[in-house]
Image (cartoon, rainbow, N blue to C red):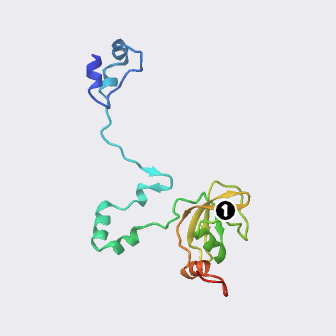
Amino acid sequence: MSRALVSRSPLAYRPPRGRNPAFLQRAGASAALAYLGSLTRTASGPFTLDLASPLDDIRAAAADGPDGLLPLLLPLDTGLDAFPEVELTADEVTAIARGQFVRPAGGVPGRADRYRLRDPSGTLVAIATASSGRLAPDKVFTSPAPTAMAAASAPAPGAPVG
């Protein structure tokens, strides 16, 4: 077996640097002829093939428009069970939506890399990291309420305009 034959296929075995073709002969012919014909990922974290939707089902649902896909979607925080949950007050949600750090009224539960932040109704609003007892939003899934944005940008009563 020559080195030229080995270098023709990107998936063929290549000897470590500094090895000569005699190494390939000792490794055996199967080492140079092996390849991967297919690969199926059976799981990724908590997601398994059992939870997957068949492609034909997705195509059929998409034919009904984007709303047809909604029943196939999993909740936003599926797979984030390792992140502790923190319930925020309405004011804290507004601050998080603006990208501000918050010190939750209920405290920060335990030590973790990331936290799931929920509004008072239980909806996931952000993923955050903790620093000195405060939560810093990392990924935010909500917007500030229009009235909160207008109040924040409106001048104080009696303040000069312009």
Type of amino acid under label 1: Leu
Q: Residue at x 63, y 71 (%)?
A: 95
Residue 30 against residue 99 in the figure, above or below: above
Quadrant containing the C terminus in the rendered view: bottom right
Residue 99 is situated, as x and y percent measured from the top left of the image, at: 59, 65
In the displayed structure image, the side of residue 33 where residue 141 appears, left or right: right
In the displayed structure image, the side of residue 134 where residue 149 appears, left or right: left
In the displayed structure image, the side of residue 42 where residue 134 appears, left or right: right
Residue tagged 1: 135
Residue 37 against residue 61 in the figure, above or below: above
Q: Nearer the viewer, residue 115 or 61?
A: 115
Q: Nearer the viewer, residue 124 or 39?
A: 124
Residue 70 is situated, as x and y percent measured from the top left of the image, at: 39, 72
Residue 85 is situated, as x and y percent measured from the top left of the image, at: 63, 65
Residue 83 is situated, as x and y percent measured from the top left of the image, at: 61, 59
Q: Residue at x 59, y 69 (%)?
A: 98
Q: Residue at x 53, y 71 (%)?
A: 142
| Residue positioned most to the bottom | 158
Q: Nearer the viewer, residue 73 or 118?
A: 118
Quadrant containing the N terminus in the rendered view: top left
Q: Residue at x 36, y 70 (%)?
A: 69
Assess disc 1: are there few (<14), some (14-19) or many (≥20) residues with their C-alpha within 10 Å of its C-alpha.
Answer: many
Indicate the secondary structure of the residue bearing disc 1.
Answer: strand
- Determine the image quadrant of residue 51: bottom left
Q: Nearer the viewer, residue 141 or 57?
A: 141
